[in-house]
Image (cartoon, helix red, strand yellow):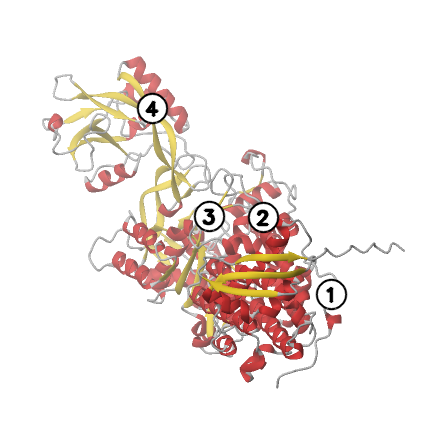
Amino acid sequence: MTDTAPRQPAAIPDRPSLEGLEEKWDGVWSEQKLYAFDPETTRDQVFSVDTPPPTASGSLHVGHVFGYSQADMIVRYQRMRGKNIFYPLGWDDNGLPTERRVQNYYGVRCDPSLPYDPDFTPPQEGGDNKSAKAANQLPISRRNFIELCERLTEIDEKSFEDVFRTLGLSVDWKHGYQTINAHSRATSQRAFLENLAAGQAYQSEAPTMWDVTYRTAVAQAEQEDRDRDGAYHRLGFTRTDGSGEKVVIATTRPELLPACVALVAHPDDERYQGLFGTTVTSPLFGVEVPVLAHPLAQPDKGAGIAMICTFGDANDVTWWRELELPTRSVIGRDGRFLPEAPWITTPEGQANYAELAGLTVFSAQKRVVEMATESGDLTGEIEKISHPVKFYENGDKPLEYVTSRQWYLTNGGRDGSEGGLRDELIARGRELTWHPAHMESRYRNWVEGLAGDWLISRQRFFGVPFPVWYGVGADGETDYDTVLTPSVDRLPIDPTIDVPEGFTEEQRGQAGGFVADPDILDTWATSSLTPQLAGGWNSDPELFSKVYPMDLRPQGHDIIRTWLFSTIVRSHLQQDALPWKHASINGWILDPDRKKMSKSKGNVVTPIGLLEQHGSDGVRYWAGRARQGVDTAFDEGQMKIGRRLAIKILNASKFALGFGEAPADPSGALAADPAAVTDPLDRALLANLAEVVEQSTTAFEDMDYARVLELVEPFFWAFCDDYIELVKERAHGNAPSGQAGADSARAALAIALEVQLRLFAPVIVFATEEVWSWWRGGSVHTQPWPVAEPLRAAAQGQDAALLDTVAQAAIVVRRLKSDAKVSQKTPVLSVTLRAPEAAAGHLEAARCDLMALGRIEALEIAGGEVDAISTEDAELGEPPVKQPRNKG
């Protein structure tokens, strides 16, 4: 039943303000569990979101509030469309960033050889000296270190949650998760064991990209090219045919000369046809190596003939594998040259290598160049160049290839067969709906460019352990072919603490016993399971059936190659399905120099000050103005505009609600009685609003929140500046149309205000909720999304252009007074409005409102062959006398 009781003006504050709204409404929403997921549901009723779990190490930056606000706008729209929202938020709290923060914060480092100290107290708490050397950090046991990681991430996660609550995210906090807690460890370990059983996970000892600072393997997706200065050094290899001739190669890595296993040139390069099949000896070290042909060699690069070393770059790895060459590694996991190189047998070569043992790569290069210069093996001038070098995305030293045993997961990178896994994953990308659509090509290009399977093991401490042990032979050597795994019902397990079935702790590390795999899963190998983690794949199958595949994955375009791709890989392998139906891709935040904001670059802005200064609605407005997939400049000016908009919503609503009685439920009244709005101008307003609603709905269905703001915001300002000013006298009952005209204006005002509050609600969440509470029960965020049909019915065919025509006429009348340099309150004794023929009818329909707005006493409207509305024969009255203020 429609409530027709008058509104109570006392419910409207005298001075509406944005201050304090975030805390006020977050408290109300939490108490009412407004955003809680209802488990009593069916899959078709649910809209589920695979929300990015932020890395819980340090503080959030403005890029977080940017991307999460945009996702929340989509979610809020879907909630208003009647969907049962599953919107959890997790924390990515394992991995290297957390370890580094713990080291700096507590002044410690992990030493797995040390015993656990149950009474350990860290030497400091609260430090953040990122440049502190490891030598100055207290070594502690692995278990003590992990406990500190868990303690600090809990602190960080609480502060992150406070920011997101202030931002107004409509998250269901009951369904939060962590990527390192027992639930996530069990889920990740189960997935790995299933991959292992299916032959999709495997172990291999092979050259691996290695970060010497963090001493861990690095996957292809975590690498980036950085331009670095380098130089070509020309070194002469001596032919072994007795001629004494030199074969000169050019290399940027002269320090790898002792690791040389062959020279290689293109098979069609005429300069080296006579060399193929012969051998040469390396300068300084005297090792005999073959000269071979391979199509990867580039005749126009350097000298056209290259030395193959194990390993300098990806080409070396390819040549080594395809030409079946020996392995001669010289760089260890610490980035220093190994103590011995047994393949170097000459006394001179051994002496030269002894000068390199223990040196860093940089120092070894310098020494090799000095020795080659002294021996005359360095020929010609050193040629300075700039070239791309591989780095770990979080590292500050070039990556090196180190031979090591690692775990891999198939991802199509080594699959060249048609219709194989690579093609299946590309097809998954086509199956996914992308917003914007062109982002699919970034995904496809990444998959097509993969050079190997996904390296999923890391030589770190805080993460999900591989649930694996290895048998130890009778000779005391680890047998990596004897892989021991736990039953699923034992998960999660830590193999460094737990014991495999059939063994006892006393057999750890003993002949005939077992050893634990010391590595942890790559953080992406856990994060790639966020749909399964949040949806309860391993713990709540009923919930999982109601939320999976999820409807939406919102994320940045920079992690399409990592998080998005890896999630598709895991879902394809585990569930043979896409993990979600839609992917909404946001851009980067750029600093004033148009560079990406990131913690590693030190140019980020933290959000707390912005939220306090501009209000959450202002910051959300800035995020909502940015188009999907487009990099956006950090712009406080946009936030200021958003704050002004939120304030205007408060003030204009207070004004619009102050005209007297109106339908308490205008949407309901409208549906029951389309004739409630009778005046042509009022009907034109609703006709325009119907267009805005229809177009906004279309935009939101395409998840285009920026387009929605482009539609709703101009209408709102026109509503405030034009329509309210035109009808306020009539709404007060001060017009010839009397009560009928007032009723029509009040109904139109109430309808338009309510619809606009609903349209703005996904973006301007706090101001709209505040206004709603002045005259409505419940929350604006659980109201139905407006629809156009009732508005069109109320407009009863009225031409929507009438409103714009009358607004233009109002501008002309205002300009008349401005040009005469008199107050807008000055009466117009008489005036003629000349307008195009079609517009004249519009002006006639709104004659009374125009006269009231312009204080016009006599108005003539003349239609004719003119292009625009203009005034003629205007006679102005006397400006009103200003009344002195009563200072008493």
Labelled disc at residue 353: 4
Q: Is residue 799 left or right of residue 750?
A: left
Depth check, front residue: 404 or 665: 665
Q: Earlier along the polypeptide chain: callout 4 or callout 3?
A: 4
Q: Give the residue displayed 65% in from the left and 44% down from the top.
A: 125
Q: Earlier along the polypeptide chain: callout 4 or callout 2?
A: 2
Residue type highlighted by circle 2: Ser
Residue type highlighted by circle 3: Trp
- Measured in 3D between alpha carbons, the distance from the residue under mark 4 to the one under mark 3, in whole angstroms, is 48 Å
- Measured in 3D between alpha carbons, the distance from the residue under mark 3 to the one under mark 2, in whole angstroms, is 18 Å
Q: Secondary structure at mark 4?
A: helix
Contact? badges 3 and 1 (CB < 8 Å): no
Q: Earlier along the polypeptide chain: callout 3 or callout 2?
A: 2
Q: Secondary structure at mark 3?
A: loop
Regarding residue 448, the answer to whether it shows in the image is yes
Q: Give the residue displayed 54% in from the left and 69% down from the top.
A: 844
Q: Secondary structure at mark 1?
A: loop
